[in-house]
Image: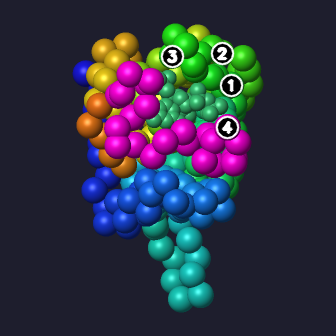
Amino acid sequence: MSNLTVFEHPLIQHKLSIIRNKEVGTKEFREIVDEIASLMAYEVTRDLPMTEVTIETPVATTEKKTLAGKKLAIVPILRAGLGMVDGIMKLIPAARIGHIGMYRDEETLEPVEYFVKLPDDIDQREVLLVDPMLATGGSADMAIDALKKRGANKIKLITLVSAPEGVAAVQKAHPDVDIFTASVDDYLNEDGYIVPGLGDAGDRLFGTH
Ligand code: PRP
Ligand code: URA
């Protein structure tokens, strides 16, 4: 079974509670998703490999640690995943960005893939797959399949709000993928919305319906 990490950090929980409020408008929603994404990126990158380098400080020569140069790719699931990209890039500015376009058919709730563009060397990169919402898990499952089909072999899924059903689905289909989320909510309603959730993340980020 894949590892599930729920971030209990007070800043993440506080900011998530703010954007759950239906009265919060697009500007504030977008800004806070960006902030939460940065905080989550800090936690998700805790295990990045490091290497020793020699540094000449103004005072002495010393051996200190630096990132091992392992390559990363940030891959948002369009559209809503785009809202998390800038926040992560603030911490990892050299990461490559891939895109996976996917939407849920509103009747069947089945995901429909419409676009995939990834770095050529995706097989050599750790992938941070980002989407604010993990509901049935269908979109994440299909996006992970698309990544694996193109050679990705180290994938972390980062979401803001997850349904227990979506977590279970991804854990079952992709036991090798670690899931990081700010909340596992109560359940999915009959329309496929996470309860209590925060509504339609894409619509709230982009101000559309
Ligand atoms: C939302 C969300 C996820 C998906 C989650 O996207 O951003 O991608 O639904 O649902 P699932 O786990 O049941 O697949 P949506 O289909 O609304 O598209 P959008 O991002 O373009 O708004
Ligand atoms: N997608 C969303 O944006 N919100 C939900 O609650 C479920 C799927």
Whether pointer 1 and pointer 4 mark residues with C-beta atoms closer than 8 Å, the reply is no
C-alpha span from label 2 to label 1: 6 Å
Task: Determine whether, in the image, residue 15 is placed left or right of residue 118.
Answer: left
Whether pointer 2 and pointer 3 mark residues with C-beta atoms closer than 8 Å, the reply is no
Instruction: Give the label on residue 101, or none.
Output: 1
| Mark positioned earlier in the residue sequence (1 or 4) | 1
Q: Alpha-carbon neighbours of circle 2 within 10 Å: few (<14), some, or many (≥20)?
A: some
Three-letter amino acid code at the position of disc 4: His
Whether pointer 2 and pointer 1 mark residues with C-beta atoms closer than 8 Å, the reply is yes
Three-letter amino acid code at the position of disc 2: Glu
Is the distance from the Cβ of mark 3 to the nearest ligand 1 atom less than 8 Å?
A: yes
C-alpha span from label 1 to label 4: 17 Å
C-alpha span from label 2 to label 4: 20 Å
Query: To which residue does mark 2 refer?
Result: 113
Nearer to us of marks 1 and 3 is 3
Q: What is the span of residues highlighted in magenta in the rendered image? A: 188-209
Three-letter amino acid code at the position of disc 3: Leu
Front-lying residue, 64 or 30: 30
Q: In which quadrant of the rendered image does the C terminus lie? A: top right
Disc 2 element: strand
Please determine whether, in this image, residue 190 is positioned above or below residue 12: above
Query: To which residue does mark 3 refer?
Result: 109
Q: Can you give x and y, in whole percent of width and height, for residue 204 in the image?
A: 60, 47
C-alpha span from label 1 to label 3: 15 Å
